[in-house]
Image (spheres, rainbow, N blue to C red):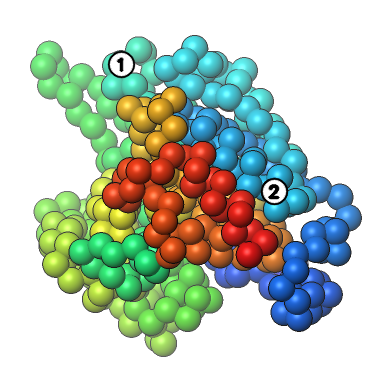
Amino acid sequence: MAALRALGSAGKNFSFALNVVCSRTLATSSLLSSSSQTQFYSPAAERPDGDFKVTMIPGDGVGPELMHVVKEVFKAADVPVQFDEHHVSEVQNMASEEKLDEVLNSMKSNRVAIKGKIYTPMEYKGELSSYEMKLRKKLDLFANVVHVNSLPGYSTRHNNLDLVIIREQTEGEYSSLEYESAQGVIECLKIITREKSRRIAKFAFDYATKKGRSKVTAVHKANIMKLGDGLFLQCCKEMAELYPKIKYESVIIDNCCMQLVSNPYQYDVLVMPNLYGNIIDNLAAGLVGGAGVVPGESFSAEYAVFETGARHPFSQAMGRNIANPTAMLLSSANMLRHLNLEFHSNLISEAVRKVIKLGKVRTPDMGGYSTSAEFTAAVITNLNA
């Protein structure tokens, strides 16, 4: 690690990628033996010394309701985590530089966060960069990872899907560089840099290597944006040469959308710039059941943020007790795995999957009539099953 630190910030980011994307296997031997030899859940035996502190940002829409579900399930599973909760919203008069600084200080202290979607209003109020974007850039959360995985027992148009979308999310079209060059003429700058393109490409190939994936596909529009996307594509090609065991290919973004809808099984790991990732994340979530079932996570060299894969506040469901907690609960399980709490992670994710597989308790977005509270109660019941 000393040698890696000497390489500077770039090496620091790359070495982090080797660690954060793999499943943490540092759980104690007693925990592993207890979970394999008995069907009874004994949380006292697995609790580490002290609790982990995690920053919680409920966000807007159904975010606070889903965070309440996470807290209820964590309490029932006796998860050794304490939440440092911060409410930030651009539409609820809870947005200021002071609040943003509080969140950043909490993140810098805890290094791990779970968050809901902070709604970004479309009205221009003198500030182009949203609070979502500010958090990503200030924490340098350059890699967003969305694992699109079919849920057993829940049938969709495409079943048995298993693909990963990796998105660079600190530059590209979301650089907040817009201005009116002449009356009625707006210029919006798309920023692509070699440094960040190589960084996200290396992250993708590291992820594929650690997860035993066989192929990485770069998504681009270099046929039209020859310089910007051309640079991104060139960086991916250069990085592919360092990973001869991983098959590499590229696809134009419009063709990628069509192929995902018609034959998504051809893809394994997809890596792409910011805007394309935002679109593909949501498209792919729709393939396996929608925004309520796909977890996501974002990484920097020092921090990890866990959230839903399709970032949607679902404001129309707020207060109606119909939001699907699946995506947020699976995200929280991934967070526990990141914290080396493998036992608790498996406990929660398996309980969620069992509820869905049984098919008796499903929220309206999955074709059922159950409430969020009923789904949560079913998950808690299955924690000890």
Residue 193 appears left or right of 59:
left
Residue at the image point whose x is 43% and y is 39% from the top: 371
Q: Is residue 96 left or right of residue 34?
A: left
Nearer to us in this view, 281 or 302: 281
Residues 288 and 120: in front is: 288
Could you tell me residue 327's position as x and y percent? 45, 50
Q: Quadrant of residue 316?
A: top left
User: In what element is the residue under mark 2?
Assistant: helix
Where's the N terminus, which quadrant? Answer: bottom right
Asked if one can make out residue 195 in the rendered structure from this viewpoint, the answer is no
Report the amino acid beneath label 1: Tyr
Q: In the image, what residue type sits under mark 2?
A: Ala
Determine the residue positioned at 49% across, 22% down.
Answer: 89
Residue 333 lies, with reference to residue 82, above or below; the image says below
Q: Position of residue 37 (x, y in %)?
A: 76, 81
Query: What is the CA distance from the residue labelled 2 to the residue labelled 1?
Result: 43 Å
**Which quarter shows the C terminus?**
bottom right
Q: Which residue is mark 2?
A: 76
Residue 132: which disc? none
Image x and y of residue 14, in percent: 56, 64
Residue 103 sits in which quadrant?
top right
Rate crowding at label 2 as few (under 14), some (14 to 19) or many (20 or more) other CA atoms within 10 Å. Answer: some
* Residue 382 visible to the viewer: yes
**Residue under the point 20% across and 28% down:** 187
Residue under label 1, please give it. Answer: 124
Q: Residue at x 17, y 62 (%)?
A: 261
